[in-house]
Image (tube, helix red, strand yellow):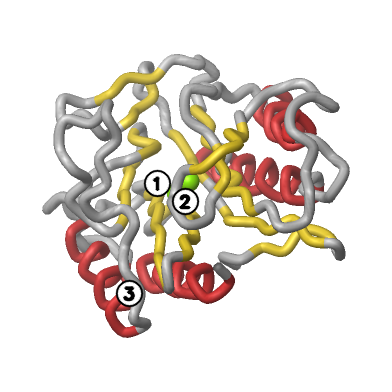
Amino acid sequence: MAASGAVVAEILASCRAAATVGTSLKELDDVAMDVLARNGATSPFLNYQPRSAPIPFPAAICTSVNDAVLHGIPTSYRIVGGDLVSVDCGATIDGWVADAAVSFVVGEADPADLALVDATQDALAAAIDAAVAGNRIGDLSAAIGAVCRSRGYGLNTDYGGHGVGNSMHEAPSVPNEGRPGRGLKLQPGLVLAIEPWFMAGGSDDYRIDADGWTIRSADGSRTSHSEHSVAITDSGPRVLTR
Ligand code: MG
Ligand code: MG
């Protein structure tokens, strides 16, 4: 999974470097496809179709811009200066999956957007710090939720973190809010995709586009999403997608 995670990290770094004003979201997907192929990896996103989705996911990355936060389909949309872009990506090598996401602003940033991105990064870091053997899933959830609420942002636990292994979405789920000391006890060998996503408007409501995939803040406010795949080990949390 560390090998898959290294590919995911390379994809996210490459997409971020390629994401300049005028770059299309589809072009970012092409970048991801190239990195996957060069590393002998496949995409767990491409053609993924949970029961809730009307069509298989048609790309190797999710690209979610501004009020879109999760599961955006890469289109011909060209990035405009000030856009807040999230890229979410997976890779599979020898049947082992890793999953991670980054959010960033292209061009001149609104300070409020940078603060929002900082919040999901800080929440992710806090949850990673809590990802130690003997702690429980609720400790991660509480750490994420505390960062979100203390800064006045909204979150919704319909979508959140998850176990990751031979498939992308495995038990246990890792909600982005919860009570410390509750839930599954963490043991070495467990790998979690931890993924806070917050909405700047402070509302917890979201909506799904007609494409059946793209998730947006209901109030149109900006959003951010940060994710790493993290292994619980005897010597503490090991981030596989850094
Ligand atoms: Mg992801
Ligand atoms: Mg994930």
**Residue placed under numbered mark 1 in the picture:** 84
In this rendering, position of residue 223 left or right of residue 207: right
Say what amino acid the circle numbered 3 marks.
Leu
> Mark 3–mark 2 contact, CB under 8 Å?
no
In this rendering, position of residue 214 left or right of residue 115: left
Image position, residue 233 (x, y; %): 78, 61
**Residue placed under numbered mark 2 in the picture:** 103
Label located before the other in sequence (1 or 2): 1
Residue 54 position by quadrant:
top left
Say what amino acid the circle numbered 1 marks.
Leu
Quarter placement of the C terminus:
bottom right
Q: CA distance from mark 1 to mark 2?
A: 7 Å
> Mark 1–mark 2 contact, CB under 8 Å?
yes
In this picture, is 141 found above or below 226? above
Residue 173 position by quadrant:
top right
Say what amino acid the circle numbered 2 marks.
Ser
Residue 10 position by quadrant:
bottom left
- The numbered dot on residue 36 is 3
Quarter placement of the N terminus:
bottom right
Label located before the other in sequence (3 or 2): 3
Determine the residue positioned at 28% across, 24% down: 208
* Front in this rendered view, residue 172 or 119: 172
Determine the residue positioned at 79% across, 24% down: 182
Image position, residue 20 (x, y; %): 30, 65
Foreground label between 1 and 3: 3
